[in-house]
Image (tube, grey):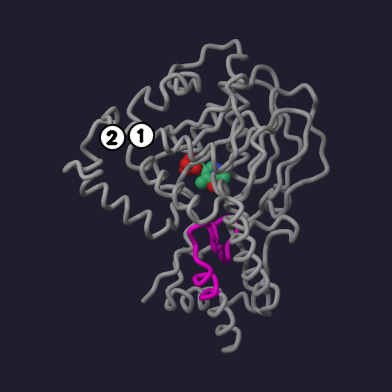
Amino acid sequence: MKKHNFNAGPSILPREVIEQTAQAVLDFNGSGLSILEISHRAKDFQPVVDEAVALFKELLNIPEGYSVLFLGGGASMEFCMVPFNFLEKKAAYLNTGVWAKKAMKEAKGFGEVVEVASSAEATYTYIPKDYTVPADVDYFHITTNNTIYGTELKEDLDVNVPMIADMSSDIFSRPIDVSKYICIYGGAQKNLAPAGVTFVIVKNEALGKVSRYIPTMLNYQTHIDGGSMFNTPPVLPIYTALQTLRWIKAQGGVKEMERRAIEKADMLYAEIDRNKMFVGTAAKEDRSRMNICFVMAPEYKDLEADFMKFATERGMVGIKGHRSVGGFRASCYNAMPKESVQALIDCMKEFEAMH
Ligand SMILES: *Cc1c(COP(=O)(O)O)cnc(C)c1O
């Protein structure tokens, strides 16, 4: 049976990207060696990093003066690297979910943290809009897509201070105005690569402004100077990231990814709104295109396990909602084909017809 992979992360990758990765594991570039058993400093591997960096810059239209890094540690490591490198006195954070809160917790160890707004009281079902960012902060930190709650900032905000964004789960799903940010980071395992590599886009001139000692490995400058090769980088996930970047480019770039994301999300939200058995959990204007969260309507609450079984039998994978939200979450990242979204919609329609 065909599987429709709605996993939230690690998550779906384009089939050809997985095949190219498998090929490189068996024989990298016809070298007779696996990519798993060569030096990251081998002359064949440097072009992989170079091209991945170049494609990052090209696809996201990154201005001059920014560096692209591939590191270990996950987005969670960035929660502390960001304040380590950028927080001198005071930073502002928008609390839109568990990841935002974790980022904020780390920052508190480095300076004053202003929570400009929070939607915690409503289980993060919306993104706060009425707030002011103090003019004297070193940066304003946002989480553009709240993977767990299915809310998303689908446009770059306008604020008078430099922004830093966790874009773990919506990078490459829309064009971004990178010039508004001094740093953009994310774990690659949602929309780019397998787990193990973390991408960081950093504005070079924003660095070097804090007075504290920064441990070598946690200092972005180390990795800029080392070209992401200060120590052994996650070689295989970087290779896969490159294949995904090439795939995005061949499909038509981030504009096309955005068009598809809108199309898929509109299809599924339309069914959630039409079908009497389901209700969306996120505020309509903040609905995420990447993670679509819904629950059973109150009068059908008892049928949640039944629908899960029904959908699983029809090939749906990974649609269980995060434990803090319950219900269902269909993650529709870039690699998710429209046909899989349609298959889920068909399940919802059939289930409704049965009741
Ligand atoms: C998954 C996720 C994280 C955590 O990423 P790790 O790489 O596991 O540390 C952080 N932020 C967001 C928005 C996420 O979706």
Q: Is residue 255 magenta?
A: no
Residue 32, quarter of picture: top left
Residue with the most extreme bottom position? 354
The answer to whether residue 125 is above or below residue 182 is: below
Give x and y (percent) for residue 132: 82, 34
* Front-most of residues 99 and 14: 14
Give x and y (percent) for residue 60: 58, 41
The answer to whether residue 343 is above or below residue 13 is: below
What residue is rendered at 28% in x and 34% in y? Answer: 44
The residue indicated by pointer 1 is: 47
Tell me the magenta residue range: 321-344
Callout 1 environment at 10 Å: few (<14), some (14 to 19), or many (20+)?
Answer: few
The reply to whether residue 113 is in sight is no
Q: Amino acid at mark 1?
A: Pro
| Quadrant of the rendering where the N terminus is positioned | bottom left
The answer to whether residue 315 is above or below residue 173 is: below
Give x and y (percent) for residue 299: 67, 78
Callout 2: helix, strand or loop? loop
What residue is rendered at 32% in x and 56% in y? Answer: 19
The residue indicated by pointer 2 is: 44
| Label 2 within 8 A of ligand 1 by Cβ | no
Residue 281, quarter of picture: bottom right
Report the side of 136 relative to 299 (left or right): right
Mark 1–mark 2 contact, CB under 8 Å?
yes
* Front-most of residues 215 and 168: 168
Q: Amino acid at mark 2?
A: Asp
What residue is rendered at 43% in x and 38% in y? Answer: 52
| Quadrant of the rendering where the C terminus is positioned | bottom right
Give x and y (percent) for residue 220: 50, 23
Q: CA distance from mark 1 to mark 2?
A: 6 Å
Q: Is residue 323 magenta?
A: yes
The reply to whether residue 183 is in sight is yes
